[in-house]
Image (spheres, grey):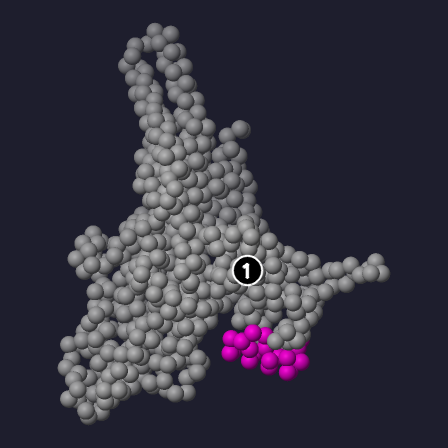
Amino acid sequence: MSNIRFKALQDVLSRTIPEVKPPSPKISDYFGSNVFDNKKMKEYLSSEAYQGIVNSIEKGEPIPRDLAEQIASAMKAWALGKGATHYTHWFQPLTGTTAEKHDAFFEPTADGGAIERFSGDALAQQEPDASSFPSGGIRNTFEARGYTAWDPSSPAFLMARTLCIPTVFVSYTGEALDYKVPLLKALNVLDKAAVDVCHYFDKGIEKVNASLGIEQEYFLVDLALFNARPDLYLTGRTLFGHMSAKNQQLEDHYFGSIPERVYAYMQDMEAEALQLGIPLKTRHNEVAPSQFECAPIYEEINLAIDHNQLLMDLMDRVAKRHNFKVLLHEKPYAGLNGSGKHNNWSLITNTGKNLLSPGKTPKNNLMFLTFFVNTIKAVHEHADLLRASIASVNNDHRLGANEAPPAIISIFLGSQLNDVLDEIETSRISKKIKEENLLWQGIPKIPQILPDNTDRNRTSPFAFTGNKFELRAVGSSANSASPMTILNLIVADQLKKFKYDVDKLMKKGEKKDLALLMVIKKYIKESKNIRFEGNGYSEEWEKEAAVRGLPNIKTTPKALDALLSDKSENLFAESGVFTVREAHARHEILLDAFYKKLQIEARVIGELVMNVIIPAAITYQSKLIENVKGLKDIGLDKSTYASQLDIINRISEHVNFIKTNTEQMVNERKKANVIEDLRQRAIDYDENVKSFFQPIRYHVDKLEQLVDDSLWPLPKFRELLFIK
Ligand code: ADP
Ligand code: MG
């Protein structure tokens, strides 16, 4: 049969479930077996070399050259022992995905033979031909070089037969061309600021790091059906498709039993992830049909992000073995829940203390309140920047679409902690309380286990969940480094201000604890507006947020303005996390990706309607016309073919609408393409080109309902969504 949809459906029916054999029944037997971790380093290195590298990593210092040489040869020995032939610097360019260029270990020798070689230099630094990665104008042609440099804080790993070395990616002039450099810089700033504040409570704390647990939502679709939908494989989402009669309305998928085929895929994917040291712990069905989630145990943030980037890549690779395609797009199917990537974030000291975990004693509570309130204040001050950090063309479909957190950044604390903050705000902490005991009475009791720890307000973009904050507005395909750089940076900046404010009071003679509490109280008041416990999806909230003066920026091109505001510029400059040029470059890259993705979608819509959908509709219409002619020929009156005439007319109406609107869309695209100013071009694409997508789709979906099923060329939602 020529209809590609039917061919695909036949393929789906012939699927068998591949046998999945994890390396061992016990995960602990193989967890991390493909990672050159500390344990392996210890095994392959002399104890001095091992200690040397551990020290350098802990202090964040560069690894001396002779050490790098020893580590390179240890890595090589380990990798060759596991069958590796190649190595690569693995990095995270601003395309949002990961990049790698493999080089063989092998080198010919003068006597005509060959050996495997891997030098310290090759480990430490590479110069990939980087001219095709987005640089936002940072790399002019005369300085087109880009360098990747080893990030020893993230261990090397083996992917298939290639040794992968996590690296940063910078330009010849030292500017960041990736997601990792600013993240590492922000973490440094955070470490310093947080340790300083910790010293009010505990002089023994030497280091503070952020921890991150990333929940990853995704859809699975059969590979044959995916390949029969050019919109899916060219844009990652369906641009057409009438909603399936049954979809998510019965809410029977969430946490339901995992379909057999999917279960096999998950086990296979998890086994590979676990060997790569990605500590996957949780798996479950999500709300929409064929939507799933996996989550690892949280890790040190830089590693957690590397692992998530690696996981996204791995998920897709393993899926092919199971004839699946993983859809990481934020909104593959209109009308169904989209996918996000919840970022569970906290601060942890070198002494193992979670700074966002309420303490047992009032004194510990004061420390908790300090970090808790400073985080709230930071988000209040820079909500626009946090919003910008999660902005993308894909995420625009999700945010504020009544199914995901809105474009308004607010914070959910749960009633108990809200009450605690209210209590402090209205309490009469005053300079008169000189007596220690009285002061402690001023701090409300915070139970260690918060009952509304589980009372999750799913509608909040930023929620406190017991001992961590959860940023839920991140898109499923995003690199978490973007929002996490901003979050860590703004918290660091806030902690510096806090220290300044507290020290000032102390210099005036205030006792330390009282000074801390006074500043906390002040911050609670100042940041009150961002706290919201109600339904974030509701219209009332939009109205209230407007009254409160909270930004509600629904589209990416405008949300990105925050990257260039004076306030952000100061923040970046003071912390050194982004130079002005880097911030501008990122702004440009993000705008560029935004409009180009819409451009691609508009083109795909144009091609599909003209070459696939309208022809199918006309084929059916011609059949009806034949039928009407036949009925007429045998002498029947009009009443016998009135329905056919009605369908014939309706098809013409839809086809006309689709064709004229597609032509208008193409015109608008042409106009937008010549707009010089990139921001304006992106806005124009958003407002004048994208605005055609929905009306055109509406009429295409109407045709889908009218046209003979056997003539419809694109797999339908009901076929895509229910896994056989
Ligand atoms: P839910 O879906 O109910 O939010 P999950 O168990 O799916 O919960 O995910 C919670 C995530 O939060 C996990 O990745 C978990 O490891 C992580 N997490 C727990 N504690 C912390 C913490 N202190 N810092 C960062 N992440 C944490
Ligand atoms: Mg969660």
Q: Give the range drawn in magenta.
A: 44-63
Q: Is residue 59 magenta?
A: yes
Quadrant position of the N terminus in the picture: top right
- In the rendered image, residue 604, in percent from the top left (x then y), is placed at 44, 36
Residue at the right extreme, as displayed: 111
- Image quadrant assignment for residue 660: top left
Residue ID for mark 1: 172
Q: Residue at x 53, y 56 (%)?
A: 98
Q: Residue at x 29, y 83 (%)?
A: 503
Against 562, residue 204 (above or below) is: below
- In the rendered image, residue 55, in percent from the top left (x then y), is placed at 55, 80
11 or 649, nearer to the observer? 649
Q: Residue at x 43, y 55 (%)?
A: 585
User: Does residue 572 appear anywhere in the picture?
Assistant: yes
Name which residue type carries label 1. Answer: Tyr
- In the rendered image, residue 344, in percent from the top left (x then y), is placed at 38, 66
428 or 459, nearer to the observer? 428
Against 412, residue 219 (above or below) is: above
375 or 557, nearer to the observer? 557
